[in-house]
Image (tube, grey):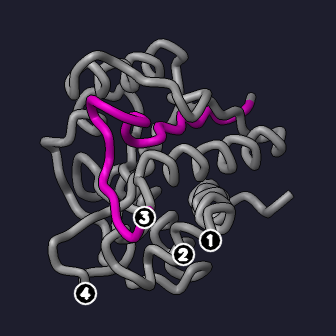
Amino acid sequence: MAIRIFIDQGHNPSGINAGAEGFGLREQDITYQVGIYLANILNGDPRFEARTSRTSPEQVLGYSNTSSLAERVRLANTWPADYFLSIHCNASDNPALNGTECYVYENYSQSYYLAERILLAIVDRLDTYNNGVRINPSLYVLRRTNMPAVLIELAYITNYNDAQKLENRQYDFAYAIYQGLLNYFGLPPM
């Protein structure tokens, strides 16, 4: 039976729960496209089945920040997914901050080990700085999902070099997440 991966493309296209911006890029556009690439890669591999939270670039989930997050979790829980991946871009007032990090609910869990594999695959493929796997049990999508969940901060949209990668290498980010999943499950590439 195929492993079910729910891909949550962080943030809405506009209005409530819109994402960060930097260098003329919008987080919600990048996360949407990386999520679509990842879903296509996974659905092209018979060992996986993938769904996305946003099925079109204009789709808005929820009517407030909380209801937007709740809808993403509801979609994953009712499917039900085996794993939940939430894709984001980081931002900071300090333009020097850069790199990739992952957030999970707790240490030394399935989520934690999956996050490690995804993080290393992104760093390896895109040469981003490794900011590590971080524990954050307060994040709604990590707290409320019924399956192992990882929130992936691809890179900093507010750092020039990272922003270049976020703009020009979206497929590479998606493929790296796929590679991280393969490494976690001990599966060879197709």
Q: Which residue is mark 2?
A: 165
Mark 2 surroundings within 10 Å by alpha-carbon count, few (fewer than 14), some (14 through 19), many (20 or more): some
Q: Which residue is mark 3?
A: 24
Q: Three-letter amino acid code at disc 3?
A: Gly
Kindly report which numbered mark, 1 or 3, lies closer to the viewer in this rendering. Answer: 3
Do the residues under discs 4 and 3 have CB atoms within 8 angstroms?
no
> In the structure shown, which secondary structural element does the residue marked by tag 4 occupy?
loop
Q: Three-letter amino acid code at disc 4?
A: Ala
Residue 121 in the figure: left or right of residue 91: right
Query: Is residue 164 shown above or below 87?
Result: below
Give, as a single range, the part of the protein colored magenta. Answer: 2-24
CA separation, marks 1 and 3?
A: 13 Å
Do the residues under discs 1 and 3 have CB atoms within 8 angstroms?
no
* Residue displayed at 44% across by 78% down: 162
Residue 141 visible? The answer is: yes
* Residue displayed at 51% across by 29% down: 53
* Residue displayed at 54% across by 44% down: 32
Q: Three-letter amino acid code at disc 1?
A: Asn
> In the structure shown, which secondary structural element does the residue marked by tag 1 occupy?
helix
> In the structure shown, which secondary structural element does the residue marked by tag 2 occupy?
helix
CA separation, marks 4 and 1?
A: 20 Å
| Residue nearest the observer in this picture, 123 or 82 | 123
- The answer to if 33 sits in the magenta stretch is no
> Chief secondary structure of the magenta span?
loop
